[in-house]
Image: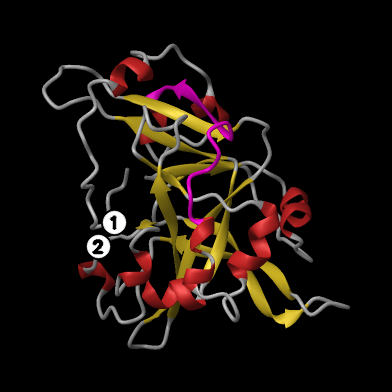
Amino acid sequence: MCGRFALTATPKELMELFGLLEAEDFPARYNIAPMQPIVVVVASDRAKPGSNLPERKAMLVRWGFTPGWVKDPRKFPLLINARSESAVGKAAFRAAMRHRRILVPASGFYEWHRPVKGSGEASQTYWVRPKRGGIVAFAGLMETWSSADGSEVDTAAILTTGANKSIRHIHDRMPVVIQPEDFARWLDCKTQEPRDVADLMAPAPDDYFEAIAVSDKVNKVANTGPELQAEVTPIRSPETASRNRPDDRNGDDRQMSLF
């Protein structure tokens, strides 16, 4: 899935990649956790100067999706991920898939290999980043939740898909990655229905990411420094671990697991 990620790019780099007219300054973040504010990119209602394409803008939202019809968020599961294969059919995500698709900039994400229960083996944390560096754009969904007193909270979830070959030995899911040439189509919720962008919700190419074994310091939200991404010797080979991994094909469709 996607339970932690990082964004260490500069506002200028975000502006260049996403075609933003402006972006507020923000610090490098090495351990972004659920319920924290995250930067997302959305299509605005205004057209770019000299173009019929909509402007894009960056905004802060809470990572943890809350559908508009929820009366008490305290009694509703924390939705940080949405399964791309079934999101359009889920009551929680149906409207956002049609009207509020977003991009979530990241420098990479963390994933955990969980050993077979009872095996006595330790879990291993991995920092997964683009091989060629730079910023990756995760597909996301946004919803604005309004309370009875009229206050509003912008919330978001990251879409996931089946893992590609380079990630599968660690975990069977990974975030959906939208390539720059597809930004406009993904963000266009006026003419592009969910079925029109279904082809974008596929695993990233097998050679897109590299997985680096790191310590488990990222498990603690209080740890926020670059040392979280320092490479360590893996506790055991992920390729070996994959041979003992249980069959997760049935999955858990509740979409509220932190990892």
Amino acid identity at mark 2: Pro
Crowd rating for badge 1 (residues with CA inside 10 Å; few <14, some 14–19, many 20+): many
The answer to whether residue 156 is above or below residue 212 is: below
Left or right relative to 32: residue 252: left
- Is residue 99 part of the magenta span, yes or no? no
Specify the quadrant of the image occupied by residue 47.
Answer: bottom right
Give percent across and percent down for residue 99. Answer: 50, 78
User: Is 132 drawn above or below residue 230 in the view shown?
Assistant: below
Q: Nearer the viewer, mark 2 or mark 1?
A: 1
Q: Residue at x 30, y 70 (%)?
A: 90
Give above or below for 89 relative to 18.
below
Q: Which disc is residue 77 wearing? A: 2
Quarter residue 36 falls in? bottom left
Task: Look at label 1 and name its amino acid.
Answer: Gln
Q: From the image, tell me which residue sits under label 1.
A: 255
Residue ID at (14%, 27%): 117
x, y (%) of residue 16? 78, 53
Distance, label 2 to label 1, CA atoms, is 9 Å
